């Protein structure tokens, strides 16, 4: 298949962005490191590692599609309970749906839960996702919705409205689901949440919202195949991306990775990326701070700081070719530059000018352009695989384990402690 | 009136967070600078400066409320066209509404515009906001909606469905509105967009969505009054906040300001803050990178990086006291810590434990707690005034003009140039 996107890293070199950029001379060495990391990824893939597994799998899709159809038939809206890796991948995919039915309830905010529980419980179905089965807010929100649904519909009908996705080990969520007679799908135990976008965690809500989940996998597969077969790092965009990120961290002190897609349908993709990048690499003093920007919107919010504040890191601008569309018509003086153009041309010109002005101000810029004029399921699958590979490769190069998140567990223990004490007031 | 929130900066000192924090010893000096900056703000306010103007004004409210009623009566949904300072303040306020009718169209994304224009144009009314009257995406989206509405309803009825807010100077948007017979409200020329949340720009959509705009102003007034009368910087929370931010930038190299409210209703407030902080201070190498976090959600996304990645800056955790609510009931083993608690208690315990664990990992933390158990119009007005004052004071202390955004204009010229050329394909 032809490539679903192209990547241009010329804007990260000092020829484009001056002293803020990398000298071209030393880049071969870091590409060599990326190549070694890619070899490791290939070995691990051959041994069954999960990162690219779902790109080459389709035998699990009928079960996912059947579960989606079943839950879809039980309610006109789906309340999806889960957070982090249990929501952001699914949101990324659902953003490409023609119409959205799944409402993601990611927080334990009492106001949000009360509002959603008060409106149309009888027309709702529920999906609860937690790999550990012990996530406090997922359990708490599940309990509130369960109580409301069981009260309104009776326990048997309520149970038919719920579906749980959780790891196969014993857990509070699994025990609750079993006791209530709720169907359970397994979260694959070796798939980390932030990299589960292509597994049932991501695909189930997408299928509910009408996204072509086979196209998502096909898009991811095209990137994975290239990663498995490329003869050099320079022929593998995720490896080049990892090389660029690591070199800018080391040689230019890059502290941030700003992702700025010029498409509303990629706004939630930016949020998914921010978890992926932060949680995978933020270990032992490594990593850089992601930022979920959106073009053109953040030109009117963050651009002043990016251009004239202290240099913070590297910018990734994602855009797409303008679709055919009726042109805008203005016969006002002073608007001849806009007359006859389309919204898509405006977005593309904004992406191009923002990239250029960032470079002119000494900021390194990587550009990614989708091949299609629309952000579809296939393109998002490709972008997801690109950034999962880039992140894992960067982790290998930095010497951190991209698949763990050890620091957050201490906070959870502390929270339980505070919560126990809050009851003793 | 009693204070609508409290601020606790003890977590920014090395006694709480070790080497990442400030020594208490030198903090008096920077508080002295904040005090001098506050004196300047007071002088400017006495001379008519706009920053606190709307907190003490109510004679403009009847006109805003009447315009809101009028536009509300013309459509069941309101499409609000505008971006940056023309949308984020309004979104912040609308997030406290019992139900939202205003849909913010901030981007020139052809997909979004086509989707919204295709559905129910006949049931829509339109608000277009641009201070300059020359914002490319606002003009372009306005033109698309105008064409669709004029086509569906005829130009006279379409004109009655539109309202424009723009600066009093001649501009393309003003000329278009005049030619179509659309009502125009003036954007006050000396109010910068990101600080216009209390002006008609922010209040009009809020009033449309049913927010008590007088309560917004009252909340802001309580903070402004304190800023005008406090006998020392230590008695003025925004001055203390500015002192803290500036000291951490200078002495600990803080590069980021992470805002993490534990309430869904403050998620859009975080976006507004990110523009305010970035665009006001990001000049001449000054400023720090804001991040729009949301508690508890970002505990499952960013916390690993915050705890174990490189230190990036200062964390502001905003929470509220738990409301009275029916307790959660679990009789599962292993869930006794959650049994009998409420969602609000869970959120508060999460905020407390996240603050503590950040401090334990050497990260400076400021805490803000609302006095009410609900994020209402008054509380948001108070927070908005707090952060506008803190930002302006920090600008004065850093020696940058917090009311300008000079760097973004070069990008706009470049975009027009690219756009003109894109038509020559």
Image (spheres, coloured by chain):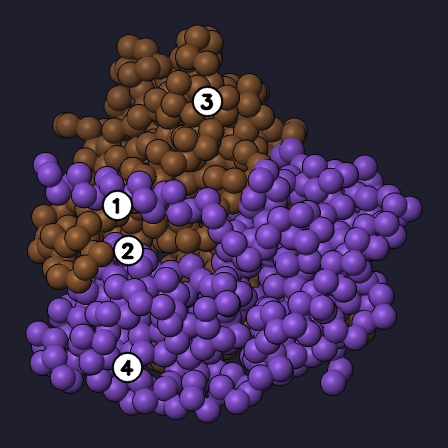
Chain colours: A brown, B purple
Q: Earlier in the sequence, mark 2 or mark 1?
A: 2
Residue A171 in picture, x, y percent from top left: 55, 52
Q: Earlier in the sequence, mark 2 or mark 4?
A: 2
Q: Is residue A253 above or below residue A417?
A: above
Q: Which of marks 3 and 1 is in front?
A: 1
Mark 4: secondary structure: strand
Image-based side of B260 in relation to B200, left or right: right
> Dot 4 corresponds to which residue?
B183
Q: Are marks 2 and 1 in contact (CB under 8 Å)?
A: yes
Task: Tell me the quadrant of the picture where the N terminus of chain A can be found.
Answer: top left
Residue A119 in picture, x, y percent from top left: 39, 80
Chain holding disc 3: A
Q: Which residue lies at the image location 61% right of the left edge and 32% below the top edge?
A: A283
Q: Which residue lies at the image location 51% right of the left edge and 32% below the top edge?
A: A313
> Dot 1 corresponds to which residue?
B416
In-front residue for pair A258/B155: B155
Q: Which residue lies at the image location 49% right of the left edge and 75% below the top edge?
A: B199
Q: Which of marks 4 and 1 is nearer the N terminus?
A: 4
> Dot 3 corresponds to which residue?
A18
Q: Do the residues labelled 3 and 1 touch (CB within 8 Å)?
A: no
> Dot 2 corresponds to which residue?
B136
Q: Do the residues labelled 3 and 4 touch (CB within 8 Å)?
A: no
């Amino acid at each position: 298949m032809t490539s679903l996107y192209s990547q241009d890293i010329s804007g990260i070199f000092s020829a484009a962005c001056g002293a803020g950029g990398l000298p071209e001379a030393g880049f071969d060495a870091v590409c060599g490191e990326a190549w070694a990391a890619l070899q490791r990824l290939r070995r691990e893939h051959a041994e069954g590692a999960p990162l690219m597994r779902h790109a080459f799998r389709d035998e699990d899709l009928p079960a996912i599609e059947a579960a989606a159809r079943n839950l879809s038939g039980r309610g006109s809206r789906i309340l999806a309970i889960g957070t982090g890796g249990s929501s952001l991948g699914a949101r990324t995919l659902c953003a490409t749906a023609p119409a959205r039915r799944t409402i993601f309830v990611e927080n334990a905010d009492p106001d949000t839960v009360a509002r959603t529980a008060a409106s149309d419980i009888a027309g709702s179905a529920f999906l609860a996702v937690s790999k550990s089965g012990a996530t406090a807010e997922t359990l708490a929100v599940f309990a509130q919705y369960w109580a409301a649904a069981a009260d309104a519909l009776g326990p048997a009908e309520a149970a038919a409205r719920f579906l749980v996705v959780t790891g196969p080990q014993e857990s509070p969520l699994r025990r609750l689901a079993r006791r209530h007679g709720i169907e359970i799908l397994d979260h694959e135990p070796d798939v980390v949440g932030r990299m589960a976008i292509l597994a049932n965690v991501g695909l189930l809500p997408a299928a509910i919202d009408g996204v072509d989940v086979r196209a998502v996998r096909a898009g991811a597969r095209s990137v994975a195949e290239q990663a498995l077969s490329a003869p050099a790092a320079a022929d593998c965009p995720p490896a080049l991306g990892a090389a660029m990120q690591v070199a800018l961290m080391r040689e230019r002190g890059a502290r941030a990775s700003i992702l700025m897609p010029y498409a509303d349908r990629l706004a939630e993709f930016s949020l998914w990326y921010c978890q992926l990048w932060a949680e995978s690499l933020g270990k032992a003093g490594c990593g850089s701070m992601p930022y979920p920007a959106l073009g053109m919107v953040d030109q009117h919010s963050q651009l002043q700081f990016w251009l004239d504040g202290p240099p913070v890191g590297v910018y990734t601008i994602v855009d797409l070719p303008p679709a055919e569309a009726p042109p805008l018509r203005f016969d006002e003086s002073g608007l001849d530059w806009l007359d006859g153009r389309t919204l898509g041309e405006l977005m593309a010109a904004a992406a191009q000018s923002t990239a250029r002005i960032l470079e002119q101000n000494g900021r390194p810029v990587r550009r990614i352009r989708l091949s299609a004029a629309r952000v579809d399921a296939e393109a998002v699958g490709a972008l997801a695989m690109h950034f999962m590979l880039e992140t894992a490769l960067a982790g290998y190069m930095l010497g951190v384990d991209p698949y763990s998140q050890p620091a957050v567990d201490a906070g959870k223990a502390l929270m339980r402690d505070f919560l126990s004490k809050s009851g003793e007031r």
